[in-house]
Amino acid sequence: MSSVGDATTVVDGTTSASPHFTNSKAPISEEPHKSRLEYSAANFATAVDYMEEERPFFVKISKDGLIGALQKLDQQLRAAGRNHVLSTKEPTDWIGKEVKPGEIGLINHGGLPKVLTRAGRYPGMPLRNWWARKWSGRCGLSDTVIEFNGLTVVQVSQNQAAVVSDPQNHVFVIKNSGFVAYAIEGTYNVLSIVDQTHLPTKIQDRITGVVLGWSHEVTMKSSTGSGGDKDYVVALFLNIPANNCAILQKGDDLELLPAGQHFITTPNVTLRGLFTLGENQLEMPTKDIFTRDQVPVSLTIYLKWQLTEPLKLTTHGYNTPYDALRDKTQSILTQIVAHLDYSSMVKQRSLGPDNLDDGTDASSAFLDALRTRAMDDLVLAAHEYGIIMKDLAVIDRQFKGDIAQTMDKLTTRALQAQVEAATSREFIRLTVQNVDRENSNKIKQEEGALAVARIKAQTQNTQADVAAYSIVAAAEAQAKRLQIEAEAQAKATRFAAEAEAEAVRLRAAADAAVIDQFAREMELRRTEISRVRAFGSKAVFVPTDGLGSQLGSAMAMGMAAGLGAEGRK
């Protein structure tokens, strides 16, 4: 689409992707999630490039720049038999008004514009014929707007837009281009040069405070014939951020305008509103609602939503999603509260998704109604308006009126009685628990003492068993030691006896083996010496055989008789 147009509705918009509502009077379908909306990709008006049409003495500035456009305009004026705009004066280099490179000089020739395009000095009177001419100054070749005696020059750069009114009062917008025009009848008026990136007026949602975009209105003064001038809006510029949109209206038709930089010049197209497509949340107070027992209550609602189809919302006559949700929420909550009593509502303090999980409490009627009806109904209603309902909660409520005060007193008394009864029950329960705890502690103490005694007895038994085992083990060890010693001594004695016997046999054998008489006699003497040495020199040896044996018995009897006589004394 061209950036310059006559009767242009939207410029720089996405024409192929902009949905256009063409049947705003169609009835809404009975299906809860569908509506009979027909959309097309057509714009309200066909964009007409103002420069594409052949207009007298209107030249577009092309790659030749401003000088080339002035030359083309001068040729058109000469061909039409009118006064040319380029001056024929030749520059000098020594005196006069100076025109530097990159500038043009302006001369008022009897009310007609004359332009000096060549750099140099232009001497005045009396060196040149200046009697009908007047020097009017210099301008830069890159100046945005030059207006001089019917000659109009407009050159706009990036992000700039010029709003111009032609001699027929047609308003058009030019961007990233320029033109040179000479008005024979009327004038080309440059109404405004707009910076599309930084529009002055910020548009916010009056409810949520979200920035929806920026706008700028261009006005034109018009004389009403009653001696005064009035300003009329001839162009509207919009800068719509990402994830936002605008709704335009032309008669009964609506059109969705996406994010971007746009302007509107067609007078029968109006801006219906700007909307955000992101999530929004708000605390909304409701009007007074009467319970079943005629107690007025005011609720504070928390809502969270997201607008996905702004055309549906605008079709139903709402300017903001809040307006649609407010009316529907008020209606749904009125129906719910009208079936509830004051007592069932006052028992619950916080109502929302966090405490909607358990519906077994008998006092949660309001929560049940909110869970089963309010959210479901709001989801369906919001879908008809193109809104996705994300969350709903009742965060506060206030009861009003004398009835509420009376009911509050009665409810307070009832609650106090319940609290007292609950306190008494709790006291009894705690007392019983304390008694049970004491009994349990005593039982545990007795059980502990019994366990200690049992452990002590087991310890003593274990110690006795250990001592007895030690004694038995010691006795067994002693007996075994004695047995071993006796056996060892017996074996030693037996071995000694056997050795002695063996020695005697050996000696006897040795003695028997001695044949010499002298050797035998010497052995007897040695035996006698050994016996005397063993018993002493005073020992008397009594023979045990023959006559000596009898003498020994008589001596023994005599000694015994002597000892008996001494005993009687």
Image (spheres, grey):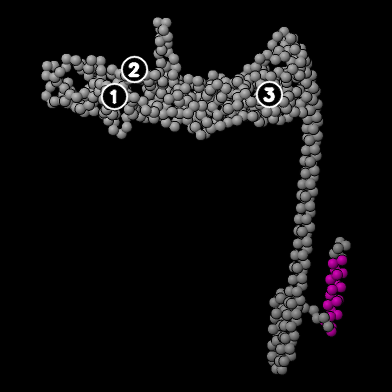
Circle 3 sits in a helix, a strand or a loop, which is it? loop
- Which numbered disc, 2 or 3, marks the residue that appears first in the sequence? 2
Residue 19 position in % (x across, y down): 55, 31
The residue nearer to you, when weighing 394 against 85, is 85
Front one among 438 and 54: 54
Mark 3: few, some, or many residues within 10 Å (few <14, many ≥20)? many
Mark 3 and mark 1 residues within 8 Å of each other at the beta carbon: no
- Residue assigned mark 3: 351
Seen in the picture, residue 131 relative to 451 is either above or below; the reply is above
* Residue at image location 84% in from the left, 71% down from the top: 559
Labels 2, 1: front one: 1
Question: What amino acid type is highlighted by mark number 2?
Answer: Glu
Judged from the image, the secondary structure of the residue bearing numbered disc 2 is loop
Where residue 262 sits, quadrant-wise, is top left
- Disc nearer the start of the sequence (3/1): 1
Placement of the C terminus among the 4 image quadrants: bottom right
CA gap, disc 2 and disc 1: 15 Å
* Residue type pointed to by label 3: Leu
Q: Going 76% across and 76% down the picture, which residue do you hit?
A: 494
User: Which mark, by number, is residue 80?
Assistant: 1
Relative side of 550 to 54, left or right: right
Tell me the crowding category of disc 1: few under 14, some 14 to 19, or many 20 or more residues within 10 angstroms, Cα based.
few
Calculate the distance from the C-alpha at mark 2 to the C-alpha at mark 3.
Answer: 73 Å
> x, y percentage for residue 500?
73, 80
Please state which of the two labelled residues, at mark 3 or mark 1, is closer to the viewer. 1
Q: Quadrant of residue 319?
A: top right
Q: Which residues are magenta?
A: 546-564
Amino acid type, residue under disc 1 in the picture: Ala
The Cα–Cα distance between marks 3 and 1, rounded to whole angstroms, is 83 Å
Residue bearing the label numbered 2: 185
Residue 310 lies, in percent from the top left, at 57, 27
Q: Residue furthest top?
A: 227
